[in-house]
Image (cartoon, rainbow, N blue to C red):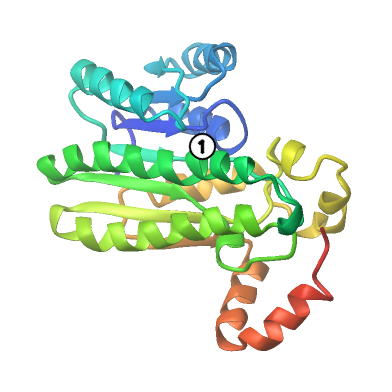
Amino acid sequence: MTSVKDKIIWITGASSGIGEELAYRLAEKGATLIISARRKDKLTEIKETCVNQYQANVIAYPLDVSRPDDIKRAVDHLFSKLGRIDVLINNAGYGHTGYFLDYDLSQVEQMFKVNVFGMMHLSQLVGSKMAKRRTGHIINVGSIAGKIATPNSSVYASSKHAVLGFSNALRLELHDFNVGVTTINPGPVETPFFDSFDPDGNYVKRIKPLVLPVEKVAKKTIQIIGTNKREVNMPLMLSMAHRLHTLFPNTSDVLTRTVFNLK
């Protein structure tokens, strides 16, 4: 898969942030797109932009990935209409901060439904069809938070840790079917994600030098489509921090709990 032109690419969480930017950049490169999210009105706007600016082929398919029956109907409909999916980008997800002992556990369940179970369900249904064709690429958007947990993000970090663990195992299982699995693990990204994760904006102000432009994350993601890349970690400073965390976990825990506790 040397080019995304004419490839059929399904993006979840496409109504804003990384997913929206991916839609524009992939439309520009000639991909056939399926864009999914809960907000039908926003999907329609993004589709119109892709069609008007880039003459792209786009299907806007509203989808709540926390609902397994809806996922099954979407997969059945899209495969009957298109016959195949070349690339699945599991980007749907959200997060918020909070001291775990005070956390509403119903919120934990809902976050895992979106960030983990929806991604797994979609990967199984689409991945099985890719395996039969012996070609395809599944890209799961994780987070550096899944590699280095920080105080007050225990639920979000654990959901992204699950994404990483699942993806690493799935990569091994699908290897012999010529289906690739890659994780994209960004640090903080300049998107509406922080509207719920950091409502007062103080955390974003403290970490401003580390915040990634959404365009950079989208560009890096597109670059690895069709490659054997295992994972992409960014920015470089946080990627290096993860390596140090692996080598010196006790020291890293002390620093993360004290010096780098910015939430």
Q: How many callouts does the rendering have?
A: 1
Q: Pick the residue in front: 243 or 123.
A: 123
**Residue 234 visible at all:** no
Residue in the picture at 49% in, 29% down? 23
Give the residue at x 57% y 56%.
143
Q: Which residue is mark 1?
A: 92
Q: Is residue 123 visible?
A: yes
Q: Secondary structure at mark 1?
A: loop
Residue 219's x, y, as percent?
Answer: 52, 45
- Quarter placement of the C terminus: bottom right
- For image coordinates 62% across by 54% down, the residue present is 155
Front residue of 92 and 205? 92
Q: Residue at x 76, y 52 (%)?
A: 102
Which quadrant would residue 30 be assigned to in this image?
top left
Q: Position of residue 146 (x, y in %)?
A: 56, 61
Residue 153 spot, x, y in % from top left: 69, 57
Relative to 215, is 77 above or below? above
Q: Give the amino acid at mark 1.
A: Ala
Is 115 situated above or below 41?
Answer: below
Q: Residue 113 or 28: which is nearer the viewer?
A: 113
> Which corner quadrant holds the N terminus?
top left
Task: Give the class, few, some or many, for how many residues have Cα within 10 Å of label 1's Cα (few <14, many ≥20).
Answer: many
The answer to whether 176 is drawn above or below residue 148 in the figure is above
| x and y percentages locating residue 220 in the rendered image | 50, 51
